[in-house]
Image (cartoon, helix red, strand yellow):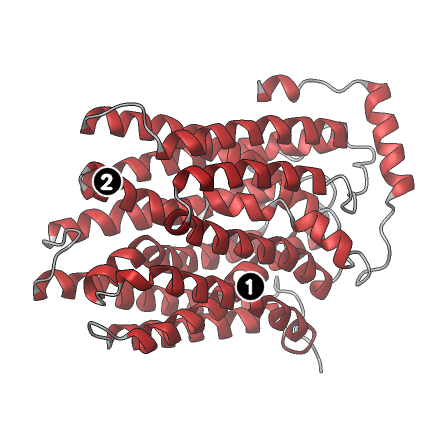
Amino acid sequence: MIVTIAAAPGRDDAANDSMNSAQANSLPAAGDVLDARRGLAYGALGLPLAFVALPLYVVLPNHYASTFGVPLAALGALLLGARLLDAVLDPWIGRWVDRWFAHSLRRVRVAATLAALLAALGFHALFFPAVTGTANLLAWCGAFLAQTYLAYSVLSVVHQSWGARLGGDAEQRTRIVAWREGLALTGVLIASVLPSVTGLGVTSIVFALALMVGLAGLLAAPRPMPSAGLTEPVRPVSPWANAAFRRLIAVFVVNGIASAVPATLVLFFIRDKLTLGAYEPLFLFSYFAAGALSMPLWVRAVPRVGLARLWLGGMVLAIAAFVWAATLSSGSLIGYLVVCMASGLALGADLALPSAMLAGVIQRAGHSGRSEGAYFGWWNFATKLNLALAAGVALPLLAAFGYAPGARDDAALSALTLAYCLLPCALKLIAAALLWRLWMRSPHAEPLPTS
C-alpha cells in the first residue's frame, strides 16, 4: 500500500500543491518560523508517537512477563528481532518520504493518515492479545510489533523531515526539534501514567485520538518549501558519504545504547531493588516532566554554549545521576526522585540537541529540501538498533545471572544494579569521549559560539 503511494507523481497535483505551499507558507526569517501556535501545530504529532517509543518499550515487556508469564529471555529475543526488522526498513522509508515530499504535501498527508490507522490498530492489539499460550503470545506480539513499528517509522520520518525542511540557524533548528520532542515528552508523561491510572484500554483510545489531532495539526503547521527541480531524491545510502554524518551518528549510537539500557530495566529496578513499585507513576512523571521542562533551557543556551558542548554537559549530568542511583538501597524514595529529575534534565539534551545537529549536517552538505528523509531514515535505524541491542542483550544477561522479576537475593539485585546503573555510565563515558574526539575537534563540526 505504501509503495503504491510512492508511485510516479501527477504533474498537475504536484504543481498545484507546491505552488500553494510556497505562496501560503513561505518561510519567515530564522527565529520567527515557529511562534507558539505554529510550534504547537507542528509538534502535536510528537505526542502520540511517544506512545510507541519509550512507554511501549518499558510497559510491554513487563506486561507480557507479569501478566502472561512469558519468559524474559524470549521477550528480549522477540523485541530484538522486531526492532531489527523495523530498523532495516527505515532507510527505505526515508527514500519513500523524500519522494512523497517531492511529489506533493497531499501525498505526504495521505501516507501519514494510512500509517496512523495501522499504528492505532496495532497498538491496541499488542496489549489485548486474542490468543493464549507462550508460543501463540510470542507470535501475536511479534506480528503486531512489526505492524506498529512500521507505521510508527513512517510517521516519525515524515515528522522529522518536515521539521528539518524548515531550515534555520542552530538556535532555530533546536527550537523546531524542541517543539517536537517537548510534546513527545508530554506524550510520554501521559502514556506513563495512563496504564496504571485508567488501564490499557483507555490508553489505546487516547493514543488513537491523539494521532488524529496530531495529523490535523500539520494542516496549520509551517509548510516546507517545495523540492524545486528534484526528479530523483538522494539514494538512501548517500548520507554515509558525508563524513560529518558518520562522525555524528557514531556518537549518537553509543549514547543511545547508554540511554536505552536503563529505559528497558527501570521498572525492574524500581520494584525489586528499591521496593517502591507503588511510586512508579511518580518516578516516571518526574523523569519525563524534568525532560520536557528542560527543553526551553537547552534552547536558550544554544547561542551561548553551542550544540555540541551542551550535549556533552548533558552526558556528564546523566553519568552523575546513575552513579548516585547505584548507591541507593531499598526504600530510597527521595534519593531516587533526585535521580529521576537529574537524568530527566539530561534526557532533554539527548532529545533536543543531536537532531538539531543532524539538521545542520544536512544543510552544510547542500542536501536541504531533497534528502532529509534519507538522513532521518538512517538516524531512526540507529535509534531502533540502540533499543534492540539494549533489550536483546540486557534482558538475557540478567536472566543468565539469575535475575527474574520479583527476585530479592543479593546476587540478582547486584546484577540488576550493575546493568541499570553502571553499564550506562561506562557507555556514556565512551560517548562523551567520541563526541570530543570525533566532533568537537573535527573540521566538520558546526562553528562554536564566539560569545
Dot 1: few (<14), some (14–19), or many (≥20) neighbours within 10 Å? many
| Element class at badge 2 | helix
Q: Nearer the viewer, residue 450 or 196?
A: 196
- x and y percentages locating residue 329 in the rendered image: 20, 74
The residue sitting at the front extreme is 198
**Residue drawn at point x = 64 percent, y = 27 percent:** 111
Between marks 2 and 1 in the image, the one whose residue lies nearer the viewer: 2
Residue under numbered circle 1: 292
Check whether the beta carbons of the residues at disc 2 and disc 1 lie within 8 A of each other. Answer: no
Give the residue type at disc 1. Ala
**Image: 289 above or below 221:** below
Labelled disc at residue 98 = none
Q: CA distance from mark 2 to mark 1?
A: 31 Å
**Residue drawn at point x = 22 percent, y = 36 percent:** 68
For residue 447, what is the image quadrant? bottom right
Q: Nearer the viewer, residue 103 or 124?
A: 124
Residue under numbered circle 2: 67
The residue sitting at the right extreme is 23
| Element class at badge 1 | helix
Q: Nearer the viewer, residue 450 or 410?
A: 410
**Image: 175 above or below 373:** below
Q: Nearer the N terminus, badge 2 or badge 1? A: 2
**Residue drawn at point x = 64 percent, y = 48 percent:** 44
- x and y percentages locating residue 274 in the rendered image: 23, 67
On-image quarter of the C terminus: bottom right
**Residue drawn at point x = 24 percent, y = 24 percent:** 136
For residue 173, what is the image quadrant? bottom right
